Amino acid sequence: MVKKNSQIPNPSNADQVLVAPRSISVAKAVTVSGLSRSTLYNFMKSGLLDYVKAGSRRLIILAELDAFLARLPHSGSVALV
């Protein structure tokens, strides 16, 4: 018996491979990074965050976003004495 909400495998989709996006919109970068839209645009304007243009859209390369976030200052842990 098949559950009502279960998905039945489709043989025609068996050969499809999921590919992760290489670039994302600014709106998606807001979600991924936790930074505000205006903060991301300010970093792009200042040249600290690289992006590409596709027509009127700005796309952020995921590798660039990861590298940018890694360069941001990290709060250090405080040793308890």
Image (tube, helix red, strand yellow):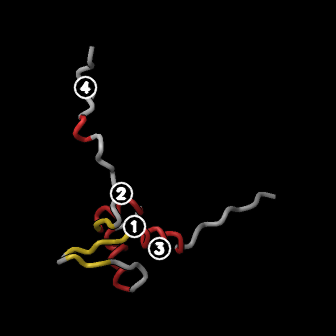
Give the x, y percent position of residue 31. 35, 59
In this rendering, position of residue 79 left or right of residue 42: right
Number of callouts in the render?
4
Instruction: Determine the image quadrant of residue 74.
Output: bottom right
Mark 1 in CB contact with mark 2 (< 8 angstroms): yes
Q: Which residue has dot 3 on it? A: 68
Dot placed on the residue nearer the N-terminal end, 1 or 3: 1
Q: CA distance from mark 1 to mark 4?
A: 34 Å
Q: How far is the residue under mark 3 from the one under mark 4?
A: 41 Å
Q: Is residue 16 shown above or below 64?
A: above
Which comes sooner in the sequence, label 1 or label 2? 2
The quadrant of the image that shows the N terminus is top left
Q: Give the left or right position of residue 37, taking residue 55 as reference.
A: right
SS for dot 1: helix
Mark 2 or 3, nearer chain start: 2
Q: Amino acid at mark 1?
A: Leu
Contact between labelled residues 3 and 2, with CB atoms less than 8 Å apart: no
Q: CA distance from mark 1 to mark 3?
A: 10 Å
> Which amino acid is tagged 4?
Asn
User: Which residue is label 2 attached to?
Assistant: 20
| Secondary structure state at the residue bearing disc 3 | helix
Q: Quadrant of the C terminus?
A: bottom right
Residue wearing tag 4:
5
Q: Nearer the viewer, residue 80 or 63?
A: 63
Question: 10 Å neighbourhood of mark 4: few (<14), some, or many (≥20)?
Answer: few
Q: Which residue is located at x 41 percent, y 63 percent? A: 33
* Viewer-nearest residue: 64 or 37: 64
Upstream in sequence: badge 3 or badge 4 = 4
Amino acid type indicated by mark 2: Ala
The label number, if any, that marks residue 62 in the structure image: 1
Mark 2 is surrounded, within 10 Å at the Cα level, by few (under 14), some (14 to 19) or many (20 or more) other residues, namely few
Q: Nearer the viewer, mark 1 or mark 3?
A: 1
